[in-house]
Amino acid sequence: MNYIIAMLLITLGFYCLLIKRNLIKLIIGLSVMTDGIHLFLISMGYREGGIAPIAFGEWLKPPGFAARAVDPIPQALVLTSIVINICILALALSLTIFAYRHYGTTNLSKLKRLKE
Amino acid sequence: MTHAPILAIVLMVFGAFLTPVVGISARKLGLKRAREYFVIALMLAELALVLSMFKQVWGGQVLTYKLGGWQPPWGIALAVDGLNMFVAMVVAGMGLLVAVYSYVYMERDTGLDQFYTLFFLTMGGMMGVTLTGDIFNLYVFFEIMCISSYALVAFRRKWDSIEAGLKYMIVSSFGTSFILLGIAFLYGQAGSLNIADLIQKLEGISSSNLIVPLSLFVAGFGIKIAMVPLHMWMPDAYQAAPSAMAALFSGATATVGIYAMIRVVYILFGAFAIGITFATLGLVTMVLGALMALAQRDLKRLLAYSGISQIGYILLGIGLGTVLGVQGGLFHLFNNAIYKTMLFMIAGAIVYRVGTSDMDQLGGLWKNMPVTGTLFAVGALAISGVPPFNGFASKWTIYVAGIEAGRPVFTIIALITSALTLAYFLKALNSIFLGQRPKHLSDVKETPLPMMFPIMLLAVLCVVFGVLPQLGIDLVRPAQEAVMNSSGYISAVLGGA
């Protein structure tokens, strides 16, 4: 189920990036796509009824810590990736503000003065 | 020095945070340009650090550094083999020269504290991508490098830099999210993130499961190195970025992108069979880049398209997959970093003195800038592969490799593209330095000496590697061996105490 939703989000973001020309919509598409990837990553490490991956006390007794804990690595990856994504989002939005000031539009296909 | 690999990264990232402090305190104390001296000193230290690893790595050793003492594959490890070493040297060397060049070039801009902070972050990201032995770490540093380069492209906040920055950012973030998805697939299948460990684990997985992550990685890194058809952002970005940064991007960042491509596709996936795709894409890239460059009127845009074309040569050499092909490709990567940086620096010098890089408004500058003109001619001849210069040596290696690999058609197309390269550079030379000089250009002065120095140094390198091509081949041989045979890398990372 998670995988289906993750793939759906990635495809939606992909579609949005390819079809839409409004800068704000493009940025939304980008963040939807990365969120889909995050969901995909985090579901890989998920385990039904799993425990937090902190080796402590009674969790170390059988049936064993490794058999019960969720995988901590995807969580660490997603955390890092979310931070990176915030940087991109902030920079993209601030650039959009500047673009709007210079061009008076957020339509990417109208930003083509460089080619002339 | 056992800590050299991590210090090379930390020094740059630390420098990024120290630069504003140095800048502010220099202003308080009334010291002029202390910040620039600080930047150059730090870059010198960086180059010294990288070179301190040189001897051991060239002796065939693979340096590993385990962060926090965690044994790989559990912890993050840095691993330096011949290939990393080669790229790290190019990056550190070009970084130093660009820092020296920026000393004068950027003096008219404001906000230089931020500029040098971003410069250091880009350098730190590049060093991290180069030296790390962990695939997710590679992604994080790749993002650091990318995000700071978006900001550098948009640095002057004029309409052109904003437009280029936005386009670059959207296309490139698209690419990096592909890389992240590829890493997710890899982790799902192999359950590891350490490159050496992944190489071993991927051997046990059927190749049909690996096609999706492989193609994601190729698309992601392909956007960064501006492989056709993923090249649209590059001319805009290089035209609008400050020339010093365009020099850094075309010299160092493109090198790092190709390094990441080789590391992941060839060494991690061991997918030498994909080489023929690379070679074909390389051919398309070089022909299209050269044809587009012919039609340009702006010097920096022309250089950007010619950069795309040169990337094609490198991909062709590497894609051939033979010993000679990989050697030629890597040697060309090295040469490309030299003369591309140099030509962008010359374009910057013209912008600095005249105020425009539009070739229609330039002309007859040879009388004003004879030395710059000569250096531009050297760069133009080197990039078109004319014999006494380095471009000839590496292109020749690629031609021979093409024939040896039984693909003479590739060699013929590469030769024709080389002639095209000469054509558009002669056109540029003609319209900038020769011909009628417009009246308002009559009191243009020669390039200032601190800017001239890195250009001259690079020109000397062009001649040295052209006259002594064996030197260059010797330089890339350990890198080529590291590409072709990763067993030493695996045992050094996983087995070492």
Image (cartoon, coloured by chain):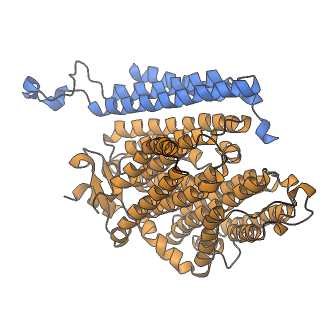
* Horizontal relation, residue B179 to residue B284: left or right: left
Q: Is residue B387 above or below residue B253?
A: below
Question: At which x and y percent is residue B423?
Answer: 81, 65
Q: Residue at x 66, y 47 (%)?
A: B242
Give the total of numbered labels.
0
- Asked if residue B125 is positioned above or below residue A21 in the image, the reply reads below
Residue A15 appears in the rendering: no
What is the quadrant of the C terminus of chain B in the image? bottom left
Q: Quadrant of residue B137?
A: top left
| B467 vs B275, nearest the viewer | B467
Q: What colour has chain B?
A: orange
Colour assigned to chain A in the rendering is: blue
| Residue B215, placed above or below residue B449 | above
Does the rendering let one see residue B132?
A: yes
Q: Is A59 placed left or right of A22 in the picture?
A: left
Going by the image, does B152 lie left or right of B69? right
In front of the other: B95 or B425: B95
| Residue A56 horizontal/vertical position (percent) | 12, 27
Q: Residue at x 75, y 31 (%)?
A: A111
Residue drawn at x 85%, y 56% is B362
Q: Quadrant of the N terminus of chain B?
A: bottom left
Q: Position of residue B450 (x, y in %)?
A: 62, 63
